[in-house]
Amino acid sequence: MSGDRAQEALEPLPGQDLDSGAAAAVPRSAPREPTLAPRRRFRRLDRVVPALERLRWPVAVYLSSRVLYLLVAIADSSLRHWTVKSELTHWDGVWFLRLAGLGYPNHVPSHQSPLGFFPLYPLLMWVVAHALACSLALAGLLVSGVGGLIATVLIQRLSIAWWGEQASRRAVLFFCFFPGSIVFSMVYAEGVLIALVAGSLLALERRRWLLAGVLAGFATAAGPTALPIIAACALAALIELRRRGWGDRSARKALIAPLLAPAGIVALGAFLWAWVGTPFGTFHAQRVEWGEKTNPLALVTLVERLFKSIHFEPTFHVNLNYPAGLLGAVFLVTAVVLLVKTRPRVSAPALLWTLGVGLLTVTSQNVPPNPRMLITAFPAVLVVAYRLKGRAFQWLMGVSVVLLIAMSVATYVGVTLRP
């Protein structure tokens, strides 16, 4: 280094006094310590920490409810000599396991078969079973349980947007300990379906149209009860277009959601057309093989069945699905009235989703408004927790936990009560 350059390099930096001897000579070209990166890290932590704090409540409540269900299953199995595995894979779980393991039949049979079930949940079971090298039963429980957890987190966020933080805590409690939440601890598709629908509704409220449409599209491949999400997406798009006008290009992006929402059911129809020769194979199987159909007087039929089981069965054996369905219908009607009257209201797409699922279940020949259908129409469950506070909510939770235990015992073993 030449003398001039050496002298230049040893010139004091701003704020540095070489004569004081307190600082060493630092070349001017020496890099300064970065200051932006730590600030960015702190900013990220400032966002992550509150997000984790918000997760603590729904995760803790959900896991507590799963422990309770597991304890009920273990106690029930020891008393009635069923294995815990057979309890958790009971009812429709048998068919989901068969569909995940064997796939759809290549024709439309005249007897009950997996053709009557939608493919997304068993497909996820198959993927998880191969990825983790575990049984299909364990994979089904994992997918269902994780789906229920995600649904709980999303439902908390929806409840916060509708009614605030405190109400969301009550909503999460009631949702997790509602008797219908047993489906998150069995091989059932509702964990996946509700998580996708809740995510789609949340995306609609935040005007994230592509995400809402994608989630809704997957939901319509999870089960027939997801079909009302198509109408919910269409309603959200119409509201956005009316608010901002058809001439607004960004408003027209809202049409992405209803265009993508039927993707799951359309894909299933295309596959079945090629596989079994008709795009309506699943619906044909439900109608012919399972005896399911739409009946506008389904609740009247339910009352007739209950009356006959009480007065004409020689052993006085009452099918608990009948009174459970009638009580569920009363709960559903009451909750819908509360949803309409409650202010601040839930979003219009969420209300339409609730009405759509409610209409499907009150007109179903064989699937009345039981706890599984009620929890699928989850705004109807959440609004009850919002309206009841203090001692009234404590009573609500007490009754719900008692029903959860009693109905789970009847559901896990035998054919007394369907999920």
Image: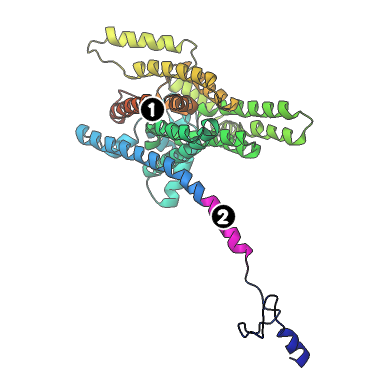
Vertical comparison of 295 with 24: above or below: above
Secondary structure beneath label 2: helix
Residue 382 horizontal/vertical position (percent) = 46, 28
Say which of 159 and 319 sits in front: 159
Magenta region includes residue 3 = no
Q: Are circles 1 and 2 on residues that touch, CB within 8 Å?
A: no
Q: Which mark is residue 44?
A: 2
Is residue 317 in sight in this rendering? yes
Point 73% across, 33% down: residue:
251
Provide the residue span drawn in magenta.
34-48
- Residue 213: which quarter of the image? top right
Is residue 271 in sight in this rendering? no
Say which of 137 and 373 sits in front: 373
Amino acid of disc 1: Gly
Residue 337 horizontal/vertical position (percent) = 50, 17
Amino acid of disc 2: Arg
Q: Nearer the viewer, mark 1 or mark 2?
A: 1
Label 1 environment density (alpha carbons within 10 Å; few <14, some 14–19, many ≥20): few
Residue 13 horizontal/vertical position (percent) = 70, 78
Point 43% across, 45% down: residue:
56
Left or right: 144 as drawn, with respect to 218: left
Circle 1 sits on which residue?
390
Secondary structure beneath label 1: helix
Left or right: 335 as drawn, with respect to 260: left
Q: Earlier in the sequence, mark 1 or mark 2?
A: 2
Point 32% across, 19% down: residue:
320
Label 1, label 2: how far apart the Cα atoms are:
37 Å
- Residue 415: which quarter of the image? top left
* Prevalent SS, magenta region: helix
Q: Quadrant of the N terminus?
A: bottom right
Residue placed farthest to the right in the image?
247
Q: Quadrant of the C terminus?
A: top left
